[in-house]
Image (cartoon, helix red, strand yellow):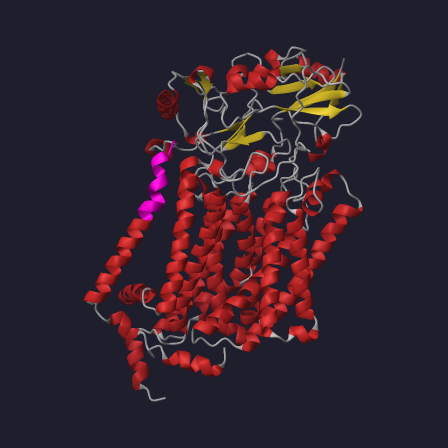
Amino acid sequence: MSDQSRKEHDQTEPASLDDMTHEPLTRRSFLKAGAAAVALSAGTAITLSPLKDLDQHFSVNEFFQQHYEELTPEMMEKILERIKQEIKRDYDVEADLRDIKPTPGVEFAYALNLGRCIGCRRCVYACMDENNQSRDPEIQYIRVLEMEKGSMDIESSNHYYNPETVPNKGKYYMPVQCHQCRNSPCTKACPVKATWRDPDGIVVVDYNWCIGCRYCLAACPYWARRFNFATPKIASNDINTEMAYLGNRIRPRGVAEKCTFCLRRTRQGMLPACAEVCPTGSRIFANILEPGNPISYVLENKRVYVLKESLQTFPRFYYFFEK
Amino acid sequence: MIRDYIIFLWRVYRLSFYGNKKYYTWMTFLTLIVFTGAYSYVNQFTHGLAITGMTNQVSWGLYIANFTFLVGLAAAAVMLVIPAYVYHNKPLHDVVILGELLAIAAIVMCLLFVNVDLGRPDRFWHLMPVIGKFNFPVSMLSWDVVVLIGYLMLNVHICGYLLYANYLGKKPTPLIYIPFVFIAIFWAVSIHTVTAFLYISLSGRPFWNAAIVAPRFIGSAFTAGPGFMFITFQIIRHYTNYKISDEALRLLRQIVTISLLVNLFLVGCEVFKEFYAESAHSSSARYLFFGLHGHNMLVPWIWFAIFIESIAALIFLVPPFARKMPLANIACFLSITGIWIEKGPGMVVSGFVPTPLGEVVEYFPTLYESLVCIGIWAFGALLYSWMIHLAIPILSGRFRHKQTRQALQQTPC
């Protein structure tokens, strides 16, 4: 802009804006302001109109719920009752919901025999039956990779193999799920301590505390975490009504979730659903603090492989090779 | 004192609605876009993040891409602050507050982008220090919240104090703002470094888990930020009577030129590192630059970005072009666009491809998601225009405290 035009520009504006801001409201400016207010209100109404389809419930009690560490047994009792009512309202089932704590002196670990797994994916579906994941959009915790014999490169694996019968010739199978790392990148990443390692080694998520930033999804080197992009849909007769607060209860929308070694089952002495269903016996699960447990046997006697060992995440999930 | 301040706020409110036709047209235009964005966001709030293009495979998209770019824009204010306050550069001293106001608008946009990305925006308070449950100092994201809010407060304080002192016609007391200016210099570098650490800290994502991300962020920020100011300041000069010297613009152009060259050099370093001895860890870079297993959505984008950044560098460097102001504007525009592409979608999305289990899923933003982004940009523009609309009359002495004005009128000059 040249100096000449700038000067012209100056002349169009008053030398001081003081009078303007001190002058009282006139009828005309009042009417103008009124018209603007009407337009803004109409805009706001249109903007907010999609809310009528909101399918996620928000409650005041949930809003003010404290962090898991600060909950007294009485507070937890009330929370469990509230969630049961929500499940009844939204999914029409009576849930047996409990906050199942870890047992002192127990530390879980998992070993998976790559020599035996045939890639049948029964573990994937048994996991869904137990853990009440959303069926639409479908969420699965276990991803089975079909690998070329002669390579351990997961980037060349096939995630969507679908033959008549398994195993495919020349392939072997590597199921991957949460490795429950001892040095877990996901819990380090979480900005609000909504996910942590319990003393029995299970990495859990408090779905009532997670803010849904998905930093843990970015942090996990095993792609073990899932996010509820939509409100979970699951038919009433597909729901497992025995639920744990930090485990398989139906998740709200907008939070992260993951494999919890089926803590609802394993903290009560059962095997995880995936280990129980495996038809080839490839999956071994145990408390490694118990003398003579099968995991310790595997670690001492078999050729054991840790996925992405170089990252030093120290997983509680081991692969081994055995016919 | 308090009464004066309340009157000031009331007058500021009145001044916000006082303007010519151009002002009203521009602000109404932005407001309409903001409403479109808000409408799209309400749709997202209603149906969940499922209406975005993000997936479990690519779990961050345009929101975090824009966030990353804007942190850079905010940090770049420091490129005016250092010459103005450390080296007492007069031409830049006149425009430094415009840069700081830009930083405020950019940080507000950053916070909005983080918020729209949350699955549970209703739980935002969990992120607040003291009242929430802050995973500090372990989580890099908690660091980012601290440095961003801190930087916002520093700039609000500095700008707010300087403008109010001007309004009162007083000389600003150095002790009240100079220490904060110097804190803000280090803080500006820290906001972008911490944002880089957000990515660098993830050992499971080799594309991000590289020290070069931090210097590249700084290099690109100091290109895009001053480039943005170079264009914006000329617009301000055109539409207001605020004096911005050609000298200030020349300095900005120099900063952009040097930073752009540094940025291109760092891109070259990264390309060499990824491809000379290509390993499994180079997959994301291969996806970005050449495509992976037949998926190559970002390939034309990244080469376009590098191409236009190189054109910009040529314009800045070749003498007959370098002296022409309109060409410099084009070069700045090309650098900003190029950096937005390489740093936003280029850096953020490629980090997710392939997944840690080797799956290749591409990311396409949806219409709603894009409208939310455009809405936030419009909100930032609205906020910045509003602040400029208030700041210019205050700085040029046309909007003053009543007694100050009377005192000035009585003094013969």
**Whole-percent x, y for residue A159 in the image:** 66, 27
Q: Is any atom of residue B1 visible in this view? A: no
Quarter assignment of residue A189: top right
**Whole-percent x, y for residue B252 in the image:** 58, 69
User: In the rendered structure, which segment of residues is drawn in magenta?
Assistant: A44-55
From the viewer's perspective, is residue A5 above or below residue A27?
A: below
**Whole-percent x, y for residue B251 in the image:** 59, 72
Q: Is any atom of residue B145 visible in this view? A: yes
Q: Is residue A268 magenta?
A: no
Q: Residue at position x 69%, y 70% from top?
A: B317
In this rendering, the count of numbered labels is: 0
Give the side of residue B399 with respect to residue B75, left or right: left
Give the side of residue B303 with respect to residue A30, left or right: right
Seen from this angle, which residue lies furthest bottom? Answer: B412
Q: In which quarter of the image is the C terminus of chain B?
A: bottom left
From the viewer's perspective, is residue B169 above or below residue A135?
A: below
Q: In which quarter of the image is the N terminus of chain B?
A: bottom left
From the viewer's perspective, is residue B2 above or below residue A86?
A: below
Observer-nearest residue: A244 or A301?
A244
Q: Residue at position x 70%, y 31% from top?
A: A308
Q: Is residue A50 magenta?
A: yes
Give the side of residue A189 with respect to residue B209, left or right: left
Observer-nearest residue: A106 or A6?
A6
Give the side of residue A14 with respect to residue B87, left or right: left
Specify the principal SS of the magenta part: helix
**Whole-percent x, y for residue A194 in the image:** 49, 33
